[in-house]
Amino acid sequence: MSASHISVQHEDFEPGAETAGLGEGRTDVGAVASFVGYVRDANDGSGVFAMTLEHYPGMTERALGEIVEQARARWSLLGVRVIHRVGRLVPGDRIVFVAVAASHRGEAFAACEFIMDYLKTRAPFWKREETPDGARWVDARESDDLAAAKWSDAKGRH
């Protein structure tokens, strides 16, 4: 079985190095698709000075592992890398990285999108933003739920 690496960490990451690691030295990889998410300086019409992400160690890694296994059940993946940062982050900081290696680009793109959609809705992270009006917890977005729902409607491989 191909390698999966999941990390929940305070430290920043280097997307180029993480992406390169999935295909380096391999001749079976035809595509690597990746996503990098950043902390924005505004949300819901309000400025954001910082965001603090909290999680339950162990529980979060298990949930991310289950999401990756669901992707592996749908697509033939050659490698998966998921990194999610926790702690206090400021606008411009990298927050999440998902990369998927596969033989073909369609599987890599679809699996990367699937993992990110499920991560946004099913991974146990709690986000608190610091705004000019004070701190507030970030609620789940209907758009994220709709993005994840499209995968539950899909039959078999996408």
Image (spheres, helix red, strand yellow):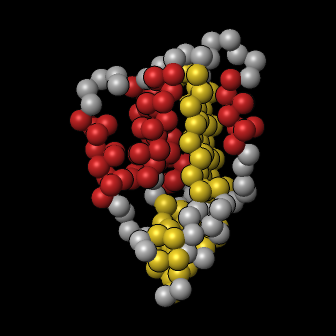
- Direction from residue 135 to residue 49 in the image, left or right: right
Residue 27 percent coordinates (x, y): 68, 11
Above or below: residue 136 compared with residue 150: below
Query: Measuring 41% from the left and 33% from the top, which residue is drawn there?
Result: 70
Q: Give the image location of residue 18, x and y in percent.
A: 70, 38
- Does 45 appear above or below 151? below
Image coords of residue 44 (percent x, y): 41, 71
Image position of 37 (left or right of 45): right
- Percent x, y for residue 85? 62, 57
Of the 4 image quadrants, the one containing the C terminus is top left
Q: Residue at point 49% right, 61% down?
A: 125
Could you tell me if residue 1 is visible in this image? no
| Residue drawn where x is 74% and y is 45% of the image | 14
Residue 93 in view in this figure: yes
Horizontally, is 97 left or right of 15 in the view?
left
Residue 137 occupies which quadrant of the picture?
Answer: bottom left
Q: Is residue 78 left or right of residue 107?
A: right
Q: Is residue 5 above or below residue 91?
A: above
